[in-house]
Amino acid sequence: MQVDMRSKPVPAQSPQSRILYVTSEMTDFVKVGGLGDVSSALPRALRVHHDVRVLIPGYREVLAHQGAIPVVARLPAASGLPACDLGKIEMPDGLVVYVVLCPELFDREGSPYGDRSGVDWIDNDVRFARLGLAAAEMVSGVADLDWKPDLLHLNDWPSALAPAFLAWRGHSIPTILTIHNLAYQGLFGAERLPALGIPQTSFQIDGVEFHGKLSFLKAGIFYASHVTTVSATYAREITTPEFGCGLEGLLRARSDQGRLTGILNGIDETWGPQSSQQLSDALQSSDWAGKPANAEQVRKTFGLAVSRGPLFAVVSRLVHQKGIDLTIQAAEILLREGGQLVVTGRGETHLESALRKLAARHPGKVGVRIGFDEAKARQMFAGSDFLLMPSRFEPCGLSQMYAQSFGTLPVASRTGGLVDTVEDGVTGFLLKETSLPELLGALYRAVDIFASPRKLNAMRRAAMQRRFGWGLSAQQYSDVYGTAAASSAG
Ligand code: ADP
Ligand code: GLC
């Protein structure tokens, strides 16, 4: 039986601060990647410490989920940003979610960021400036609510303008920006400033300007009281030119000021093996007896031949970051060693088509499903022996944690959150660097271990015993809130 945290009322114990958590994804409604999962889980975990509410755009999925959403405030137009309503949803567990109701911006067929073919919405600057401004207006009292945040917690570039809007309007409350991925910065032409209500004076190095463009993410890093990112290792990496995407100077300054903190993501209880529905056979917390039944199911779903060899899985956005090209190159060797490969994902067209071709060349040995299917992903985590994640960078990564909780050993790059969550030779295999020879080396090690059931089972047990709960992370966020509040007051 699935244990769904969301159906249980969560007591908000002596709330200390009113926190507004602003996000562009929330798995309750819509998920593109890990941000969706984090935004569903973290605000709930934080309710033990604070009175936390969420603000999201009113995408079609949100409107469909809820039916008629009660309107609690009307937000006026500002510059080129349209007027909108603010809706309020109360989730079954009592979590309050505010919704920016603006059908002309958000009620569309597609993802939060682009149309069905993956092309970014042309008005993403307006859409997400509207989100950031709505958050600021909830603070400034433009939205006349009976609940006013004491602190804003923003996530990635889509909500990163909120601290800037607060500063420009002369409101000072602590603001935290969490960077889930520095590679997505929300860059737009400087000519968009007036339409977005951004003062021309802020278009400078100490402001929103990044190499002649407007950068939403830089604005957030510059104006927020404190910046966090999703692992300690990535927090260090982004202060270097190799991983800093051009923002390493500013991030190093924030780090030197004690205003940059790495806090590892958790995974929520519904990812526990014993609580996952849709699996042929539940796995227990340190018992992988259900794995063969799930593996059989995965092979059937992906049209693979019956085999006693190792089953490798990829569950991923299909983008350069994730090293999918390396996986494709390594696949021939992996098959030669008696392995099979299953892939589910969607993303860049050239990677989708390269994967389709790989499957066509190796019927019965490689199965590829282009698309997004959470149930299938769970089955793959449960039924596979190894998860491939040769990421070029990985701020945190959730898939490798999900995999370990199902006794599936990650083969992953030594970068970001992968370093902080996978123990080389104990719960998985880390590449020394992200390259084809290193990936092949790690794959050979994995195949060797697979041939030795005693060692394989010891690793599975160690992986399943790792705990990646949200408790510690929530405590660390709460500490950062405290620090930011103290420094804003002082
Ligand atoms: P990122 O956020 O960079 O995509 P993460 O590992 O943090 O990487 O999170 C990815 C999340 O998205 C995981 O929950 C993973 O299972 C899920 N996911 C990615 N692609 C798919 C897919 N095609 N189908 C189902 N789930 C997917
Ligand atoms: C981003 C990162 C990923 C991280 C996720 C949630 O999408 O790519 O590494 O796990 O955000 O924080």
Image (cartoon, grey):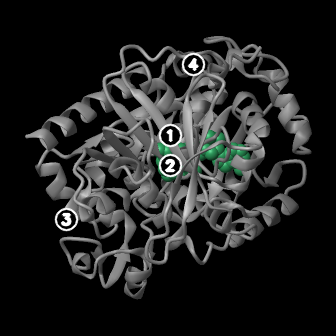
Q: Secondary structure at mark 1?
A: strand
Separation of disc 2 and disc 1 at Cα?
Answer: 7 Å
Q: Residue 249's mark?
A: 3
User: CA gap, disc 2 to disc 3?
Assistant: 26 Å
Looking at the image, which residue is at 65% across and 29% down? 450
Q: Secondary structure at mark 3?
A: helix
Q: Residue at x 74, y 40 (%)?
A: 66
Which amino acid type corresponds to the residue marked 3 in the rendered image?
Gly
The quadrant of the image that shows the C terminus is top left
- Under mark 4, the amino acid is Met
Q: Which residue is mark 1?
A: 54
In the image, residue 36 above or below residue 355: above
Q: Name the mark on residue 23.
A: 2
The answer for how far apart the CA atoms under marks 4 and 1 are is 32 Å
Residues at marks 2 and 1 touching, judged by CB atoms closer than 8 Å: yes
Which tag, 2 or 4, sits closer to the chain's start?
Answer: 2
Instruction: Name the element at disc 2.
Output: loop
Q: Nearer the viewer, residue 445 or 35?
A: 35
Residue 146 in percent (x, y) is at 44, 36
Whichever of callouts 4 and 3 sits on the residue coming sooner in the sequence is: 3
The mark lying in front, picked from 4 and 1, is: 1
Q: CA distance from mark 4 to mark 3?
A: 39 Å
Q: Is label 4 or label 3 in front?
A: 3
- Looking at marks 3 and 1 on the same chain, the residue that comes earlier in the sequence is marked by 1
The 10 Å Cα crowd at callout 2, few under 14, some 14 to 19, many 20 or more, is many
Q: Residues within 10 Å of mark 1 (few under 14, many from 20)?
A: many
CB at disc 1 and ligand 2 closer than 8 Å: no
Asked whether 446 or 197 is in front, the reply is: 197
Q: Amino acid at mark 2?
A: Thr
Rendered-image quadrant of the N terminus: top right
